Image (cartoon, rainbow, N blue to C red):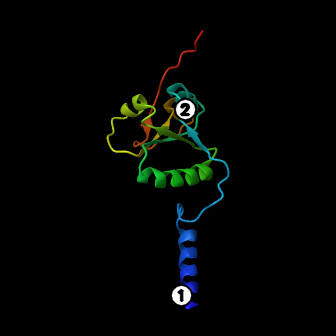
Amino acid sequence: MADGSFLHRMVSQVRSTCRYYTGYPKDLGPSRIIPFTSERQFVQLLHEGRPVVVAFTIRCTYTHHLDKVLEEAAATFYPHIKFVRVECPKYPGFCLTRQKNEYPFIEVFYNPEQAASQGKGMDPNVTKYSVKVLPLN
């Protein structure tokens, strides 16, 4: 009985102190992660003015754990930060432009013009992604 109460206290401590503890199922509601469909959709997300966290993934055991962490982070930071998952085997062109050869990895993008107009200083490690999109007529 004493072991059970110790185990209960230990698990409760981990749940309360670890922000991204994913060993316990949580009801996060509907997924807040946006599936990547095209570069145009990605540019539209950037023009909304919010930072975009992009997870570049392939099917592996690391991706399975990363998915749980991303789901929780997306639920926590919604709607201030958008989360996008890119399945690199489906969209190799977009993934290859990042010039990484170890998967999965995460990058944060933001629209530099909107950040500059708001007077915010940004972390130099955040990728600046700026494109001019012309409408189709």
Residue at 53% across / 34% down in the picture? 36
Q: Kindly identify which numbered label has been placed on residue 46.
A: 2
Q: Nearer the viewer, residue 19 or 8?
A: 8
* Residue pointed to by mark 1: 3
Residue 88, quarter of the rendered image: top left
Looking at the image, residue 119 lies above or below residue 70: above
Q: Nearer the viewer, residue 38 or 1?
A: 1
Residue 1, how many percent across, how many down? 58, 90
Dot 1, how many residues are within 10 Å of its Cα: few (below 14), some (14-19), or many (20+)?
few
- Say what secondary structure mark 2 lies in: helix
Identify the residue at image location x=58%, y=85%.
Answer: 5
89 above or below 68? above
Where residue 121 sits in the image (x, y, percent)? 48, 41
For badge 1, the amino acid type reads Asp
Q: Residues within 10 Å of mark 2 (few under 14, many from 20)?
A: many
Give the CA distance from mark 1 to mark 2.
Answer: 51 Å
* Of pointers 1 and 2, the one earlier in the residue sequence: 1
